Amino acid sequence: MADEIKLLRLWASPFCQRVELALKLKGLQYQLIDEDIWNKSELLLQSNPVHKKVPVLFHNGNAIAESFVIMEYIDETWKHTPLLPKHPHGRANARFWANFVDEKVTIRCVFKTASIAYLGKDKAQEDSIELFSQQLKMLEAELAGKDYFGGDSIGFVDIAAFFIMHVYGVVQEVKEAELMTQEKFPVLVQWLAKLEANDLVMECLQPSEKHLAHVRARLSVLDEEAASKTKAA
Amino acid sequence: MADEIKLLRLWASPFCQRVELALKLKGLQYQLIDEDIWNKSELLLQSNPVHKKVPVLFHNGNAIAESFVIMEYIDETWKHTPLLPKHPHGRANARFWANFVDEKVTIRCVFKTASIAYLGKDKAQEDSIELFSQQLKMLEAELAGKDYFGGDSIGFVDIAAFFIMHVYGVVQEVKEAELMTQEKFPVLVQWLAKLEANDLVMECLQPSEKHLAHVRARLSVLDEEAASKTKAA
């Protein structure tokens, strides 16, 4: 029996895009199901009752949630074209840096200390971006001298980091904020461009106008929230 | 050559205790190095420059950081007495619940919305404990009908959850707060008692008077911080 693979996802979510790229790198056929996260489906509520979040992967009817957990599952189930290195120490290193991406350099990490709506507009927000830059420098150092985090080919950390960092470009365009410039992060910017030139990677992304419109809409909601908070304070 | 295994740790840290139990379950010999986290050692700063946190495991000179990353490393390096299930779907499930423990039910999760120093003393803090209880209920449901999260024997999620939950008991004693009672969580309380009766588990814990004194000291610092915040506001 052929494997039945379905991915419940939100098209703009970098966490869902990670899973899609992992499936593509393995050469697997899959079906996409779009989730409406503002009006959650029965399928989502039943398959991930704990977090009620996408992505959820269905493999022959079994549901698996959380992007890194799914990526490990994919790598363990289909062993060709490995995403994680073979040796336990290399695997530990990859997991460490993947976790680092989620904890330190997502757009949410800038949000935490400053509304992205006001990026760079006062001292607190400058400090927030400075801290963010320091974290990015660590990733820049980890990547230096290699083609990919995974070495010669796209691996676990590349998948983890790429879609998170691809969003920086969109945010920069909308907000004229400088999150990751060529001058400060030459290694990461070159790596990003290399991945953006990869057909499988591009297949996981939507046209940039659609993505821009989506980010504009989300940022304007955040702008309003920040404004009403300022008013209330 | 015999493996050289060293663990840089803080004795009261549940994250470090996880690694110790994983090593013990594998029957491995190791050396403990006590870290002073208020005056961090060169060894810590050099071996985990990114987070500067314990635990750090050294295996034949190679450093690995973060408790779950280390536990995966141990399980991949020494394959007898597996901590994770064999099948990818079981492994995904274990990783999902281990992450759940760290995200939802550590003592820090109560801290987030209420100072533990004032547990249960006003509405906001009651709400915080109520939310915490709802998360614990999910773990209670996951464990129901099984001896251990890992099935018939102690596995990845048992190690992940035990030391986190063992702290509840100490906090309850110091603060007279009710975090996990027999009435509300019979399955978890029974499981906790079973693990507390296990020799290998007990070898990872310090005498309860020492632990109580440590938690009292930490909570009194938090009390002071909360009091000075209230004063400043």
Image: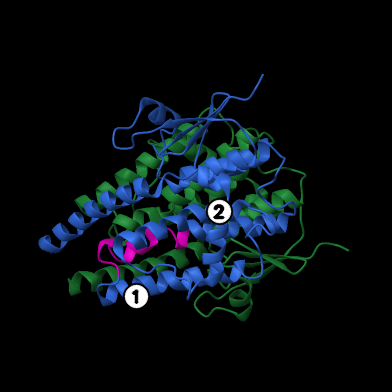
Chain colours: A blue, B green
Where is mark 1, residue-wise? A127
In the rendered structure, does residue A54 fall within the stretch colored magenta? no
Q: Residue at x 44, y 70 (%)?
A: A181
Other residues around mark 1 within 10 Å, as few (<14) / some (14–19) / many (≥20): some
Residue at the left extreme, as displayed: A231
Picture quadrant of residue B157: top right
Element marked by disc 1: helix
Picture quadrant of residue B94: top right
Residue B85 pos. (x, y %): 66, 37
Closer to the camera in the image, A195 or B185:
A195
Residue at the right extreme, as displayed: B1
The N terminus of chain B appears in which quarter of the rendering?
Answer: bottom right
Closer to the camera in the image, A32 or B157:
A32
In the rendered structure, does residue A105 fall within the stretch colored magenta? yes
Q: Are marks 1 and 2 on the same chain?
A: yes
Residue A180 pos. (x, y %): 44, 68
Q: Residue at x 70, y 58 (%)?
A: A152
* Above or below, comparing residue A5 to residue A150 in the picture: above
Magenta span covers which residues? A103-119
* Above or below, comparing residue A200 to residue A220 in the picture: above
Report the chain holding disc 1.
Answer: A
Which callout, 1 or 2, points to the residue nearer the camera?
2
